[in-house]
Structure formats: structure tokens, C-alpha cells
Image (tube, rainbow, N blue to C red):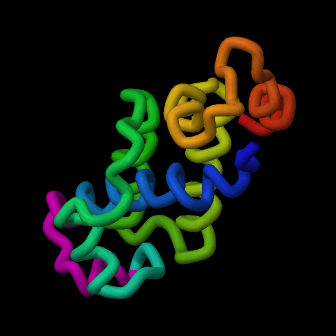
């Protein structure tokens, strides 16, 4: 079975970063500025925006709201680089704790049964 940490690293975090990059670009940042604030290269931002990366998971609406709030903090210079990274991971942990991505995980790893699995809520319920 693919570890939830591997799944998060390979699929969930890139989907969150893609949406954050989209929001920052929509709010007027250049690719270079968005890249610097998220900690990516401008070419990585380009791949996120063009849909080459981070498109596997469609994010739940409350995750999108959290990403919008994070983008606003970034645009208004109210959050530093380290806290941006913390918030990206908090959003991921929240998604895992709520079982928002179980169906996506099951598509990648046929050993995952979302109806029977309680790994993420067990690990992350006190973290959200």
C-alpha cells in the first residue's frame, strides 16, 4: 500500500501548491514573485499553471477557501516563507483528516479501501 505520506507528497501537496499558484497569479503576482513566495522555481509555477503538475486531485471547497486565505496573507506580506510552508502542510493534514482524498488514493493504490480505512483520521484528527 502506498503510504499516506508518499501520497501526500506526490499528489496532495502539488495540488495545493498548484491552486495556491493560481490564486497568487490571479491576484496579480508574476510567476517569478509567486515562485519566490511559495519557494518554487518560476518554471515550476509555469508547470502548475499550465496543468502539467498538481492536477490529479480536485480540492474540496473548504480547502480552496483555506488556500484563498493563505494567498491573501501572502499578497499582503503578512506571512513569512516558513509559515507559508507550515500552512500548506496544515491544509494537507486537514484534507487527510477529513478523508477528502481517500477516493483519489484508492484510484492510485487498489489496496486502499476508503470505506474501511481509518489511517488518516486516526493519525491526523487531533492535528486539524
Left or right: 17 in relation to 46: right
Is 40 left or right of 52, judged from the image as shown?
Answer: right
Nearest to the observer: residue 10 or residue 17: 10
Quadrant in the rendering for residue 116: top right
Relative placement, left or right, of 70 versus 22 is right
Q: Is residue 61 magenta?
A: no
Residue 27, x across and y down, in percent: 18, 60
Res 112 quadrant in image:
top right
Where is residue 48? Give x, y as percent.
Answer: 29, 66
28, above or below 3, in the image: below
Asked if residue 8 can be seen in this view, the reply is yes
What is the residue that sits farthest to the front in this orientation?
A: 110
Rendered residue at 41%/77% (across/down): 37
**Residue 120 picture location, percent across and down:** 76, 33
The residue that appears at 62% across and 74% down in the rendered structure is 82
Please provide the residue range marked out in magenta: 24-36
Secondary structure mostly seen in magenta is helix
**Residue at image location 37% in from the left, 28% down from the top:** 61
Residue 64 visible, this angle: no
Residue 29 in the image, given as x and y percentages of width and height: 20, 73
Amino acid at each position: 500500500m502506498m503510504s499516506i505520506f508518499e501520497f501526500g507528497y506526490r499528489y496532495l501537496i502539488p495540488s495545493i501548491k498548484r491552486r495556491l499558484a493560481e490564486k497568487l497569479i490571479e491576484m496579480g503576482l508574476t510567476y517569478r514573485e509567486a515562485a519566490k513566495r511559495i519557494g518554487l522555481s518560476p518554471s515550476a509555477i509555469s508547470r502548475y499553471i499550465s496543468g502539467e503538475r498538481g492536477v490529479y486531485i480536485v480540492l474540496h471547497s473548504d480547502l480552496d477557501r483555506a488556500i484563498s486565505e493563505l494567498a491573501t496573507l501572502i499578497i499582503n506580506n503578512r506571512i513569512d516563507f516558513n509559515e507559508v510552508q507550515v500552512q500548506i502542510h496544515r491544509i494537507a493534514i486537514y484534507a487527510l483528516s477529513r478523508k477528502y482524498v481517500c477516493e483519489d488514493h484508492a484510484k492510485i493504490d487498489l489496496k486502499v479501501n476508503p470505506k474501511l480505512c481509518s489511517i488518516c483520521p486516526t493519525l491526523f484528527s487531533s492535528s486539524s
